[in-house]
């Protein structure tokens, strides 16, 4: 059995907490003008930093999966697991939203509109998993020169798509390797960063500085446009944004190289990391239920963001973990978490 890489597990552990932070802080960011400027900037700062998380999840998948040579049945098992999780949690959130939150949803749109917004991640990963075995063969057989050209071409396509998106348009034809989104690109980048983590010529200090500057750019653009328009501006925080992508890539590589690229936690710490990371997918799926409960009874201005944002992140993370841990104890629970 291959030894678990705890650099990647640390990225995973940080990322699932930051995903919760995105949804919590964004609730307060969208109340711009109804909460104080200080509360808004505090929430925006957390939201900006937390945007690292989702790209990291894609990059973790690329790092762990693209270098493998797996049998077809392994791919089928992976796809089936995601489809089961999508079906089950779509049903959960459909009934939750209709009968508890009092919102509406047209089931005829379920193939292209998630029953709950955060389930978009499953809609993105299932198509990637469908073509993953072909990506694995391609990546294993490319020369170093071809790898460089591949990254240049795909990065250029991602930037082109982003510019067109800013202009309100889209490419007439997408680059088949990555489509019209950035998520497959993160998969490839995660693989190459992991593969060459010891050889990429950039210092840890430089990575940290670039990451911070990129996040500062995201923060500044968002705040500036928000001030001008009088409404919270989210477009600079999309995962297609070059600044978000650069920050995430730098953070990911920085974490990969901690401990001379081989973090060795003690046995107790390792058990804690394994326990939380084993529940991370389930926490991602379930945590919106608890955030929705807060939203149902509390407006963003009812409790100061200085208290509510960090408090909700911690409480929702812990409650979600406990629930997922219990679900995984019952028959079939692991299949949906």
Image (tube, rainbow, N blue to C red):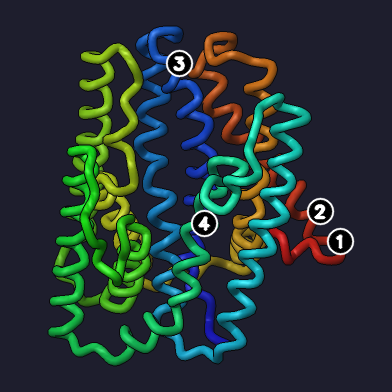
Residue drawn at 51 percent across, 35 percent down: 23
Would residue 110 be seen by someone viewing this image from the given angle?
A: yes
According to the image, label 3 marks what residue? 31
Q: Nearer the viewer, residue 311 or 159?
A: 159
Q: Secondary structure at mark 3?
A: loop
Residue 33, numbered label = none
Of labels 4 and 2, earlier in sequence is 4
Asked whether the residues under the numbered discs 3 and 4 touch, taking CB atoms below 8 Å apart as contact, a structural biologist would say: no
Q: Nearer the viewer, residue 292 or 86?
A: 86
Asked whether the residues under the numbered discs 1 and 3 touch, taking CB atoms below 8 Å apart as contact, a structural biologist would say: no
Asked whether the residues under the numbered discs 2 and 3 touch, taking CB atoms below 8 Å apart as contact, a structural biologist would say: no
The CA distance from mark 2 to mark 3 is 35 Å
Residue drawn at 66 percent across, 54 percent down: 282
Residue drawn at 30 percent across, 12 percent down: 230
According to the image, label 1 marks what residue? 330
Q: Secondary structure at mark 4?
A: helix
Q: Nearer the viewer, residue 90 or 146?
A: 90
Asked whether the residues under the numbered discs 4 and 2 touch, taking CB atoms below 8 Å apart as contact, a structural biologist would say: no
The CA distance from mark 3 to mark 4 is 28 Å
Of labels 3 and 4, earlier in sequence is 3
According to the image, label 2 marks what residue? 326
Asked whether the residues under the numbered discs 1 and 2 touch, taking CB atoms below 8 Å apart as contact, a structural biologist would say: yes
* Quarter in which the N terminus is drawn: bottom right
Q: Secondary structure at mark 1?
A: loop
In the image, residue 176 sits, relative to residue 117, either above or below, namely: below
Task: Give the foreground label among 2 and 3.
Answer: 3
Task: Characterize the local packing of mark 3: few (<14), some (14-19) or many (20 or more) Cα atoms within 10 angstroms.
Answer: some
Q: Is residue 89 left or right of residue 232?
A: right
Q: Nearer the viewer, residue 175 or 260?
A: 175
Q: Position of residue 15 (x, y in %)?
A: 48, 51
Quadrant hosting residue 320? top right
According to the image, label 4 marks what residue? 123
């Amino acid at each position: 059995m291959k030894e678990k890489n705890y650099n990647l597990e640390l990225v995973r552990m940080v990322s699932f907490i930051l995903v919760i932070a995105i949804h919590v802080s964004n609730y307060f960011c969208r109340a711009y003008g109804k909460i104080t400027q200080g509360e808004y900037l505090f929430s925006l700062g957390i939201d900006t930093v937390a945007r690292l998380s989702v790209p990291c999840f894609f990059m973790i998948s690329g790092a762990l999966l693209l270098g493998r040579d797996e049998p077809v049945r392994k791919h089928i098992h992976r796809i089936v697991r995601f489809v089961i999780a999508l079906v089950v949690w779509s049903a959960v959130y459909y009934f939750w939203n209709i009968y508890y939150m009092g919102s509406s949803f047209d089931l005829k749109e379920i193939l292209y509109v998630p029953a709950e917004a955060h389930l978009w991640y499953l809609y993105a990963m299932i198509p990637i998993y469908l073509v993953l075995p072909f990506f694995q063969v391609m990546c294993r057989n490319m020369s170093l020169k071809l790898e460089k050209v591949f990254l240049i071409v795909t990065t250029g396509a991602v930037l082109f798509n982003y510019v067109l998106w800013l202009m309100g348009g889209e490419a007439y034809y997408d680059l088949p390797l990555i489509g019209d989104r950035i998520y497959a690109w993160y998969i490839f980048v995660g693989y190459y960063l992991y593969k060459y983590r010891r050889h990429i010529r950039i210092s840890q200090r430089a990575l940290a500085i670039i990451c911070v500057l990129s996040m500062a750019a995201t923060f500044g653009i968002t705040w500036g446009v928000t001030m001008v328009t009088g409404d919270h501006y989210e477009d600079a925080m999309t995962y297609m944004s070059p600044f978000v992508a650069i920050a995430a890539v730098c953070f990911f590589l920085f974490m990969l190289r901690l401990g001379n690229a081989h973090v060795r936690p003690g046995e107790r710490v390792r058990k804690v990391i394994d326990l939380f990371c084993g529940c991370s997918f389930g926490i991602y799926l379930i945590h919106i239920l608890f955030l929705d409960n807060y939203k149902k009874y509390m407006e963003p201005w009812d409790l100061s963001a200085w208290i509510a944002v960090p408090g909700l992140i911690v409480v929702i993370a812990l409650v979600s973990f406990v629930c997922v841990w219990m679900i995984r104890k019952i028959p079939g629970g692991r299949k949906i978490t």
